[in-house]
Amino acid sequence: MKMLESKLGRIVFARLFEGEDLLETITLAAEKNHITAGFFMLIGTLKKANLGFYHQGKYKTIKISNALEIVSCIGNVSEKENKPFVHAHISISNEKGEVIGGHLMPGCLIGVAGELVLIEATNIRLLKKLDEKTHLFLWTMEK
């Protein structure tokens, strides 16, 4: 295990609007605020979901087109190719309270609204680099 310590920087609050792509909008909030290391929490609703499940080197896609509640969406912001990169997981529920979750993929569209809290980490670089063993982009950490 490799660990580095950081301090908390700014906290950015953002409201997301109907029809916005969730992943794109979180990434845009990080870009506009020049945040390349941090984490976030988000609640709200979706009208369309696109989740991923990682298995044996590939993502299986799970698509749902219904009114959905975002039970929880959490993730981190790191740096990939000199730009903010968002990695998130999301849990959503339907009108029966049944919950499904997975990796947040492009194509999740905000329903009524979303509320994002983005927290900056300072004095650290979280770089995403290709790991040859897993074929995933994983963290390398620098002070």
Image (cartoon, rainbow, N blue to C red):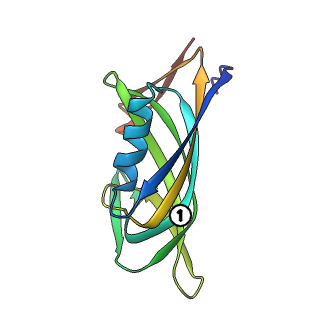
Query: Where does residue 103 sit, x and y in percent of width and height?
Result: 45, 56
Query: Where does residue 130 sit, x and y in percent of width and height?
Result: 35, 30
Give the SS element for disc 1.
strand
The answer to whether residue 33 is left or right of residue 3 is left
* Residue at image coords 39%, 40%: 27
Query: Where does residue 83 sit, x and y in percent of width and height?
Result: 34, 26
Quadrant of res 124 = top right
* Residue 50 visible here: yes
Quarter occupied by the C terminus? top right
* Residue at image coords 38%, 64%: 18
Three-letter amino acid code at the position of disc 1: Gly
Quarter occupied by the N terminus? top right
Quadrant of res 96 = bottom right
Q: Nearer the viewer, residue 142 or 10?
A: 10
Query: Where does residue 125 sit, x and y in percent of width and height?
Result: 51, 18
Task: Name above or below for residue 93 compared with residue 127.
Answer: below
Q: Nearer the viewer, residue 143 or 7?
A: 7
Quadrant of res 71 = bottom right
* Residue at image coords 33%, 63%: 19
* Residue at image coords 44%, 54%: 16
